[in-house]
Amino acid sequence: MSDLLNMELINSLPQPLWGSENGQDWWWPIVDICVETGLCRIDVCGKLQTMHFTDFLIIRDDAQVMHEPDSFYLEDEPS
């Protein structure tokens, strides 16, 4: 199985990454990401919950830069 997500991009961003389903109210710290499947675990009040990377509307890195989740997929890289 090949990777769906760009591991080099993910690792190059200031950590931790935060994900939001609506971009406003709740930001969940992303604990880890499986680059092969797109599944990730978030910290919800001290408990880990599994989500898919595309469940997020926006991803924020620790430098407060916003990223579109689609930009992390390898298929979206320019040829």
Image: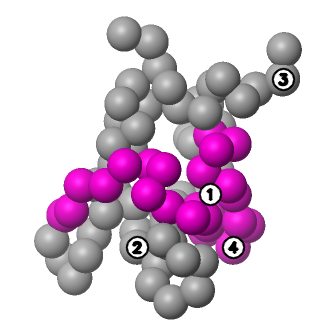
User: Quarter of the image containing the C terminus?
Assistant: top right
Q: Is residue 32 visible?
A: no
* Residue 47: x %, y % from top left: 15, 71
Q: Of helix, strand and loop, which one carries label 1?
A: loop
* Residue 50: x %, y % from top left: 24, 55
Calculate the distance from the C-alpha at mark 3 to the C-alpha at mark 1: 23 Å
Q: Of helix, strand and loop, which one carries label 4?
A: loop
Q: Which residue is mark 2?
A: 28
Vertical side of 45 occupied by 28: above or below:
above
Q: Which mark is residue 78?
A: 3
Q: Which residue is mark 4?
A: 64
Q: Of helix, strand and loop, which one carries label 3?
A: loop
- Residue 14 falls in image quadrant: bottom right
Which amino acid, mark 4? Gln
Q: Nearer the viewer, mark 3 or mark 1?
A: 3
Answer left or right for 54 relative to 39: right
**The stretch drawn in magenta includes residue 25:** no
Calculate the distance from the C-alpha at mark 4 to the C-alpha at mark 3: 25 Å
Say which of 28 and 14 sits in front: 28
**The stretch drawn in magenta includes residue 54:** yes
Of the numbered discs 3 and 1, the one sitting upstream in the chain is: 1
Q: Which residue is mark 1?
A: 14
